[in-house]
Image: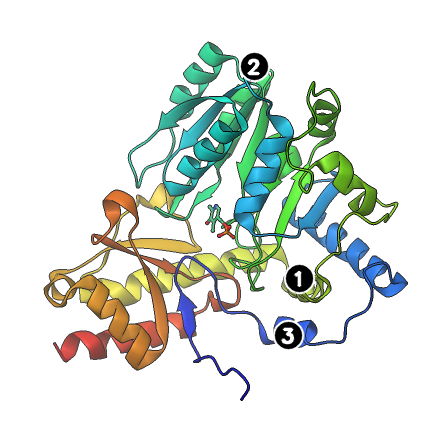
Amino acid sequence: MPISPPSRLLLGPGPSNVHPRVLAAMAEPLVGHLDPFFLSLMDEVQDGLRSLFGTTNAMTLPLSATGSAGMEACLANLLEPGDEAVIGVAGVFGGRMCEVAGRIGARVTRVETEMGTALDPDAMRDAIVRARPKVVAFVHAETSTGVLQPVEDIASAARENGALVVLDCVTSLGGLPVELDAWGIDAAYSGTQKCLSCPPGLSPVSFSDRAIARVAERSHPVQSWFMDVSLLAGYYGGERAYHHTAPISAIYGLAEGLRLVHDEGMPARVDRHTEAQQALLAGLAPLGFEPLVDAAVRLPPLTTLRLPDTVGRVGEADVRRRLLDDHGIEVGGGLGKLAGQIWRIGLMGHNARAASVERLREALDGVLAGS
Ligand SMILES: *Cc1c(COP(=O)(O)O)cnc(C)c1O
């Protein structure tokens, strides 16, 4: 018996639904990872990622692992035990960065903000001036709260003080403008399962020449053999020497996903995400759902909504369960302090369209009317 998963509309914080063209590409026959066909496809993928990241960085590649591994790769290459790091924490994923940097042995200064608000660039600047860090790291699009962070102000404070900047672009790449070079970012990572409409399993990463130079000056080798960017350069740097076996089928999928982005064009794609969020807010407002986040810093691909009493009476987890069981729709619950208080609704990649919102609204009408 073949496995037959249920059909779901994935409107949580990721994964989002995979585009049918991506699924079809992934079912194509394997070739070897050193096959000329595959190498030219890898060139195309790396070029496509450079364009999406807004960079000319030579070391831009799809790491064979999920977004969290991209986070680990950026921090593990740029930090050594005892190094100072300043990390902005506006939610769960900023917190994860602190955990990763701490395990590397870095001395971490956490600069926190209330969940649901944006990092304060002045507070970041103060911490940077005090700690004189090697690395400043933060999240562009914080998926746990639905807040867009002020990248340019923080990045310039970091660079003026000689620090390298690491940016989490997991929920922004492919859904929002990302401009690593213009913003002065030295290392960034993303994931394929959010705004790129591919399955989870790859982490697009990019390292600037400054970052690569820093890695070359390290006094200890990078602790992780697999993630050491100077070794990854053997394959992804153009020489195409064996490092590890690239996940062929996943790369087929990403190549197709990047073609879809290219065909649509980023400006149109950004507009589509913004319009889908407007439709969501307008569609659910009559049911009593209110946005958690101020309009100025709201993240289009991921909306956080305060729950109305009608949902509270049934129990928010039960309502989500009925959306899934009876309507095949997944939405995300709140994390940390926001658990039980909000939902996180992702309209990412292929799913960022009015039809997704319409299905959700009808299903919610049904679930809440019956209770
Ligand atoms: C999803 C996410 C991650 C982690 O990615 P995985 O693919 O789940 O490992 C990291 N940062 C942000 C902002 C995310 O949304």
Q: Evaluate whether residue 39 shows in this view.
A: yes
Residue 216 picture location, percent across and down: 75, 24
Does 104 appear above or below 171? above
Decide which of 234, 262 is in the foreground and name it.
Answer: 234
Does 297 appear above or below 246? above
Q: Quadrant of residue 111?
A: top left
* Disc 1 element: helix
Does 329 appear above or below 259? below
Residue under numbered circle 3: 21
Residue under numbered circle 2: 161
Q: Earlier in the sequence, mark 3 or mark 1?
A: 3
Residue at position x 35%, y 76% in the image: 359
Task: Please report contact status of discs 1 and 2: CB closer than 8 Å, yes or no.
Answer: no
Q: Earlier in the sequence, mark 1 or mark 2?
A: 2
The local crowd at label 3, few if under 14, some if 14 to 19, many if 20 or more residues have their Cα within 10 Å, is: some
Residue 277 picture location, percent across and down: 39, 59
Residue at position x 21%, y 54% in the image: 340
Residue under numbered circle 1: 254
Relative horizontal placement of residue 237, taking residue 3 as reference (left or right): right
